[in-house]
Amino acid sequence: MSPIRRVVVIGCGLIGTSVACALRRAGVRVELADHDPWALAQAARMGAGTALRAGAGPADVVVIATPPSSVAAVLREAQDRGLGRVYTDVASAKTRILAEVERGGCDLSCYVPGHPMAGREVSGPGAARAGLFEGRTWALCPHPALSPRALRTVTALATACGAEVRLLAPDAHDRAAAAVSHLPLVLSAALAARFATGAQAAPAEPAPGTAPGTAPGCGVDRDADGLSLAAGALRDVTRVAGSPAGMWRDILAHNATPVADLLDELTRDLSRVAAALRAADDGPVAEVLARGNEGHARIVRALSRTRETERAAS
């Protein structure tokens, strides 16, 4: 018998409402809370659950689906109110949140840091899907103060949502999330920003013997000249650039060092390629492209396994 019968979800955005819908589909009673009455009402209309009522007693699990910067405060308030026996969150950075939770005086024994590795580039309860987590990894990050019972309970919750649980130390999770989620978002946004209204390449000083206006980066209007030629490659690489900027500022601030370290690595590669292109030196360019082929093959294999798991779960 599943230990999950009643769950409270705080935060009716994309992830919180998707968790609620998945649990409802699994037969779990779900109650919802959100500071935004509209989001709460929309999630309830979608069948994600009913509004949390006072005096209902502690739920088996409280899922905190709020932005990273508010997790610690929401957890402390929920524990002070006795809303649940076990608590978890879904934020995509863990180390800083765990430190904030500890500083905030929360009961760590029943708090399981979590992160379902699923999402969409659209937000809000209307984008929620009950099947969002099917076959996806749900990272749980045990810490020394955590009780085994709490970990087992949240593992059961993630499994009920169709996910596959993976245990990671908080710092290992943050490095992995930086590589597979946070860095791609920054790169996608940086490329898409080249095409923002009025964006132009900064004029470069012409090399000796080069006519003015023909140097690299000579102020080409990317609105008129670039987007008229745009095709699938640009769309694919910039897809996640449409994600909510405010949410991502919060995420990146909570995982700043791992993301910055990866950006430094990438910048070194890009600088080498740029220098090699200007010097007509094919070696560094070929080396980066070859490593890119190798990395792409590994990514495709990993995603193929995920899709096979999703099909098996459906």
Image: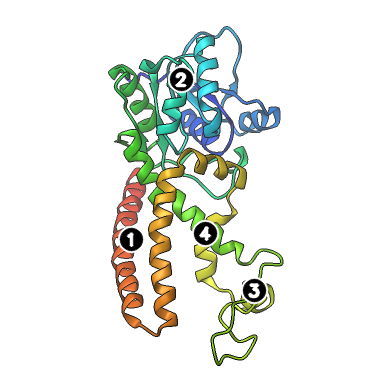
Please rate how many residues cluster around mark 3, counting C-alpha atoms within 10 Å: few if below 14, some from 14 to 19, many from 20. some
SS of the residue under disc 3: helix
- When asked about the image quadrant of residue 113, the answer is top left
SS of the residue under disc 4: helix
**What mark, if any, has residue 275 been given in the picture?**
none
**What mark, if any, has residue 222 been given in the picture?**
3
Please indicate whether residue 273 sits to the left or right of residue 35 in the image.
Answer: left
Q: Residue 27 appears at what percent x and percent y?
A: 45, 25
SS of the residue under disc 1: helix
Q: Residues at badges 3 and 2 in contact (C-beta under 8 Å)? A: no
Residue position for label 2: 103
Circle nearer the viewer, 1 or 4: 4
**Cα separation between marks 4 and 3:** 16 Å
Please rate how many residues cluster around mark 1, counting C-alpha atoms within 10 Å: few if below 14, some from 14 to 19, many from 20. few
Q: Residue 10 appears at what percent x and percent y?
A: 55, 25
Q: Residue 181 appears at what percent x and percent y?
A: 44, 49
Residue position for label 4: 188
**Cα separation between marks 3 and 1:** 31 Å
Earlier sequence position, callout 2 versus callout 4: 2
**Cα separation between marks 1 and 4:** 19 Å
Circle nearer the viewer, 3 or 1: 3
Earlier sequence position, callout 1 versus callout 4: 4
Please rate how many residues cluster around mark 4, counting C-alpha atoms within 10 Å: few if below 14, some from 14 to 19, many from 20. many
Q: Is residue 111 above or below residue 181?
A: above
Q: Amino acid at mark 1?
A: Val
Q: Amino acid at mark 4?
A: Ser
- Tell me what residue is drawn at x 32 percent, y 69 percent: 293
**What mark, if any, has residue 300 been given in the picture?**
1
Q: Amino acid at mark 2?
A: Arg
